[in-house]
Image: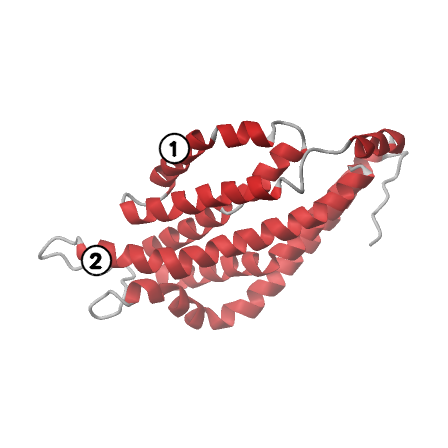
Amino acid sequence: MAIPEFDEDRPFLSHLLELRSRLMRALGATLVAFLCIYPFYDTLFTFVATPLRRVLPEGELLAVQVASPFLIPMKLSLVAALFVAMPYLLYQLWAFVAPGLYRHERTLVWPLLISSTLLFYLGAVFAYFVVLPLVFPFFAGVTPLGVNYQPDISEYLNFVLTMLVVFGLAFEVPIATMLLIRTGATSRDALAAKRPYVIVAAFAVGMLLTPPDIISQVMLAIPVWLLFELGLWLSRWYGIQAPEERSDENRDE
């Protein structure tokens, strides 16, 4: 795929024009995805609300704020559009930074973009189909007597989106692990020796980023730990940059 060339006589202006072009394309793709998704906001919200509606006595949520019935579908459609357009948005990011990368770095970017995107989606899917169906019955079960558990749609959407993003980012641990080893910032043996600290940190992150219930904390901490182990295992074949690659880099300069 062709890589854009910058005007060497006016590098700063050329960078600004290229950045504007990439941003406009990214915004256009997001807008197209939003316009395609918004007409189906009712079906989309029903899908997102299913894990909670299953545990509600009447299966209904509340709209406390006056504008919530209008704003929440728009917000949900916009987030869904970003999820759908994410591969194209990442491509625009790659196309913008590619001219400043070395040859071996260009061959490295695409696998990282693809794998990180898939892992993010996998984390979001894990949160929706595994974590949320366990969390909401717990919340409904600990509701005090005399209290009607019927959350507001705005608070519910914020909670769900936070969980999806948190788990999506947590599933990037293998990528971060391999990059640390690949760039020589640390070694595989050094990271393996810090395994107890990683496990403690995983539970600490689960405590800080998830609701105050043991289920979601454990469901985040255990995958982070296992994904860290996966990153260590993959680093056997994807280790520190080889000397010949460094020499190629120097020649490219």
- Residue 151 seen anywhere in this rendered image of the structure: no
- Which residue is disc 1 drawn over? 200
Q: Is residue 89 above or below residue 237?
A: below
Closest to the camera, between mark 2 and mark 1, is 1
* Residue farthest to the left, as pictured: 146
Q: Secondary structure at mark 1?
A: helix
CA gap, disc 2 to disc 1? 29 Å
Assess whether mark 1 and mark 2 are in contact (beta carbons under 8 angstroms): no
Q: Is residue 174 left or right of residue 157?
A: right
Can you tell which quarter of the image residue 46 is in? bottom left
Residue 165, x across and y down, in percent:
47, 49
Which amino acid does the dot numbered 2 rest on? Ala
Who's the residue at 60% across and 61% down the image?
Answer: 31
Q: Quadrant of the C terminus?
A: top right
Q: Is residue 45 above or below residue 183?
A: below
Which amino acid does the dot numbered 1 rest on? Val
Residue 108, x across and y down, in percent:
73, 44
The disc placed on residue 140 is 2
The residue nearer to you, when weighing 218 against 162, is: 218
